[in-house]
């Protein structure tokens, strides 16, 4: 069984996305070329597990999921977990947990997705955020976007803008079709 697990793990690769909180006056790219990019997708409807330590409610997560459901994405069940091992993402789920060591000070949240190297399917995802940042508007929606495979898209007011101050609810190019 151990070798089987190792073979499975060797097929999985990891991608990091970090959400930044730059000062407003910092110069950002103004021109955006093309459409938002998504290189990886789920083939199943992921469950969402919320670690109690993040202090995020099921209600708030459902609200964030609704943003994506309107764009054609589907999710499984949403539940909270008070276990001390909550941070370990299982296959088929998006786990929302506290940041790991090494989290930058200008960072408000980050997401890791794990994909299968051959199929490019997302097999699990981890969203890291502190309770105070989870309460900021759009942060949860933005990170779920990464968990669905979306990259940053630096057009002003766009949901996937890499700078929280310049982002918004614009969902251009994000529908699931
Ligand atoms: Zn981001």
Image (spheres, rainbow, N blue to C red):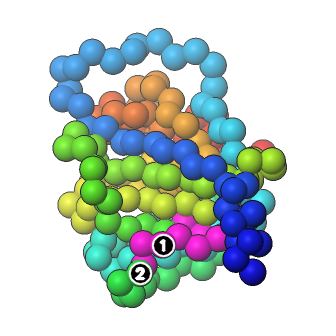
Whether pointer 1 and pointer 2 mark residues with C-beta atoms closer than 8 Å, the reply is yes
Q: Residue furthest right?
A: 119
The disc placed on residue 88 is: 1
Count of marks overlaid on the render? 2
The residue located at (40%, 34%) in the rendering is 162
The quadrant of the picture occupied by the C terminus is top right
Q: Which residues are magenta?
A: 86-94
Expressed as whole percent of the image width and height from the top left, the position of residue 42 reads 71, 57
The quadrant of the picture occupied by the N terminus is bottom right
The residue located at (40%, 13%) in the rendering is 30
**Depicted 173 relative to depicted 17: above or below:** above
Residue underneath mark 2: 85
Tell me how far mark 1 sits from mark 2, CA to CA: 6 Å
**Depicted 166 relative to depicted 150: above or below:** above
Q: Main secondary structure of the magenta part?
A: loop
Expressed as whole percent of the image width and height from the top left, the position of residue 121 reads 74, 53
Front residue of 140 and 125: 125
**Crowding near the residue tagged with mark 1, few <14, some 14–19, many ≥20 C-alpha atoms within 10 Å:** few
Q: Secondary structure at mark 2?
A: loop
The disc placed on residue 57 is: none
The residue located at (35%, 84%) in the rendering is 84
Front residue of 83 and 73: 83
The residue located at (74%, 47%) in the rendering is 117
Front residue of 141 and 107: 107
Expressed as whole percent of the image width and height from the top left, the position of residue 7 reads 75, 63
Q: Is residue 70 visible?
A: no
Q: Is mark 2 within 8 Å of ligand 1?
A: no
């Amino acid at each position: 069984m151990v070798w089987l697990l190792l073979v499975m793990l060797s097929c999985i690769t990891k991608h990091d996305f970090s959400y930044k909180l730059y000062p407003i006056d910092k110069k950002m790219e103004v021109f955006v070329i093309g459409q938002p990019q998504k290189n990886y997708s789920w083939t199943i409807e992921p469950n969402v597990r919320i670690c109690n330590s993040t202090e995020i409610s099921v209600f708030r997560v459902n609200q964030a999921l609704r943003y994506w459901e309107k764009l054609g994405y589907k999710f499984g069940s949403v539940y909270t977990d008070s276990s001390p091992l909550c941070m370990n993402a299982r296959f088929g789920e998006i786990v929302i947990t506290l940041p790991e060591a090494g989290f930058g000070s200008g960072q408000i949240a980050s997401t890791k997705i794990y994909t299968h190297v051959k199929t490019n399917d997302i097999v699990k995802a981890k969203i890291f955020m502190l309770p105070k940042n989870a309460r900021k508007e759009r942060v949860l929606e933005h990170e779920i976007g990464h968990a669905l495979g979306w990259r940053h898209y630096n057009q002003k007011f766009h949901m996937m803008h890499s700078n929280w101050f310049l982002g918004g609810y614009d969902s251009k190019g994000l529908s699931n079709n």
